[in-house]
Image: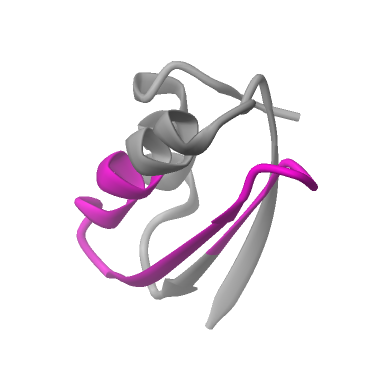
Amino acid sequence: MSRTYEVTGMTCDHCRTAVENEVGAVPGVTAVAVNVATGTVLVEGDADDRLVRDAIVEAGYEVA
């Protein structure tokens, strides 16, 4: 299963890495693809939606 999240505040490669690391550590996530230019995060796997959203916030960004 895959879900796409719109994330605000990402502006650089450091942002991408921070989000990938936090979201990638969520149980059930099998892949994460961050596109800083479009402000989207594609998450593959069967992770709990709330945990993914919390991980994005933990990385310092907001889910739109």
Say how the picture is coloured.
one colour
Is residue 19 left or right of 30 when viewed as pictured?
A: right
Residue situated furthest front in the rendering: 13
Q: Is residue 36 above or below residue 3?
A: above
The number of numbered discs placed on residues in the rendered structure image is 0
Is residue 16 left or right of 46 when viewed as pictured?
A: right
Q: Is residue 48 above or below residue 10?
A: below
Residue situated furthest bottom in the rendering: 1
Is residue 54 left or right of 28 when viewed as pictured?
A: right
Q: Residue 51 location, x and y as percent?
A: 36, 42
Q: Residue at x 75, y 44 (%)?
A: 37
Q: Residue 55 location, x and y as percent?
A: 36, 34
Q: Residue at x 39, y 74 (%)?
A: 46
Quadrant housing the C terminus: top right
Q: Residue at x 65, y 43 (%)?
A: 36
Q: Specify start and end residues of the magenta stretch as a single range.
A: 20-42
Q: Residue at x 41, y 39 (%)?
A: 19
Q: Residue 58 location, x and y as percent?
A: 35, 21
Is residue 24 magenta-colored?
Answer: yes
